Amino acid sequence: MDEAGNGGGNGVTKKFMYMNRKAPYGTVYALESLEVVLIAAAFEQDISVVFADDGVYQLMKGQDTEGIGMKNFSPAYAALGDYDINKIYIERESLEERGLSLDDLQALTWEDEDDDWKEKSSLHLVGRDELAALIAEQDIVLSF
Amino acid sequence: MKLSLLVNEGPYTHQASDSAYRFARAALDKGHEIYRVFFYHDGVNNGTRLAVPPQDDRNLSQLWSELAAEHELDLVLCVAAAQRRGLLDGDEAKRHGKDADNIAPGFRISGLGQLIEAGIQSDRLVTFGD
């Protein structure tokens, strides 16, 4: 498999946004989106990840999948910080519409090399208008 | 323009593969370049050579294979998605001890890095999904 390194990016840096809009189980999109993001981390690109609509459920704390016989892959989101993926946007309206707040989501952090490896939150709450502006800035938006 | 396509749904249940195929053909007819077509999620099912749709219906796998042969297209099935869904080429079948492979001509199996690289190399990455 040729997934290693910068994959022949030839020094080009583009803004990639990964939009997660579906619940974590029920369909495979959330899991396979996470797989794309984790591979994408190896390419030196400008990455942001969005959780909106039912996608906000992907980050819910305390997921227990025993009853559905599927793997609980939610702990893997914690690895995003290790790959310096720290622009993780949560759409405020999506949380509110579902009666949720940031406290219901798992904390995702990264360590800032330029600030004595201080642990910082990767989660950014953004409004719908703000998110629209962020989407407009991107070179590539992949929606799952 | 240099284009890449991402096809996220399998044939027949969704129109995504039909739309992607027709878009690819139209773009090529207009003189655009297709850098790569990447198949992900159930989209990998477009790459089977064992589909036998009714004779009066279109055969999407075959249409893709023909288009690839005509224009030397790079049709890539994501390896992780393909393995989950039972899409194997000769090497993969051997590696996993399976007794058959089922990849249609013109398709190859490779990693998700090929999708990211297509995004980097192309002017536009166009998604066909649900």
Image (cartoon, coloured by chain):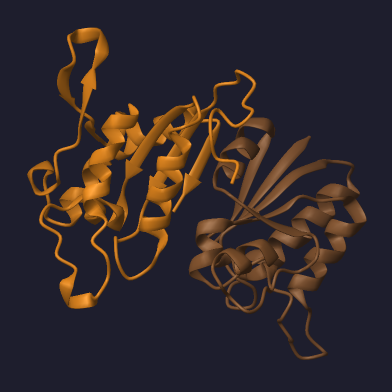
Residue A26: % across, % down: 32, 71
On the image, the x and y values in percent for residue B113 come to: 56, 41
Q: Position of residue A72 (x, y in %)?
A: 23, 61
x, y percentage for residue A8?
64, 28
Q: Is residue B130 visible?
A: no
Indicate the quadrant containing the N terminus of chain B: top left, top right, bottom left or bottom right: top right
Residue at 67%, 73% in the rendered image: B101
- The residue located at (27%, 39%) in the rendering is A79
**Which of the pair A134/A83 is nearer the observer?**
A83
Task: Please report the residue visible at 17 percent of the width from the left and 57 percent of the height from the top.
Answer: A98
| Residue at the extreme left of the image, as rendered | A103
- Colour in which chain A is drawn: orange
In the image, taking residue B124 as reference, residue B41 lies left or right, namely left
User: In the image, is residue A120 above or below residue A30?
Assistant: above
Residue A77 in view, yes or no: yes
Chain identifier for the brown-coloured part of the image: B
Give the quadrant of residue B48: bottom right
Question: In which quadrant of the rendered view does residue B40 lie?
Answer: bottom right
Depth order, front residue of B21/A3: A3
The one nearer the camera, A117 or A48, is A117
Is residue B24 placed above or below B82 in the rendered structure?
A: above
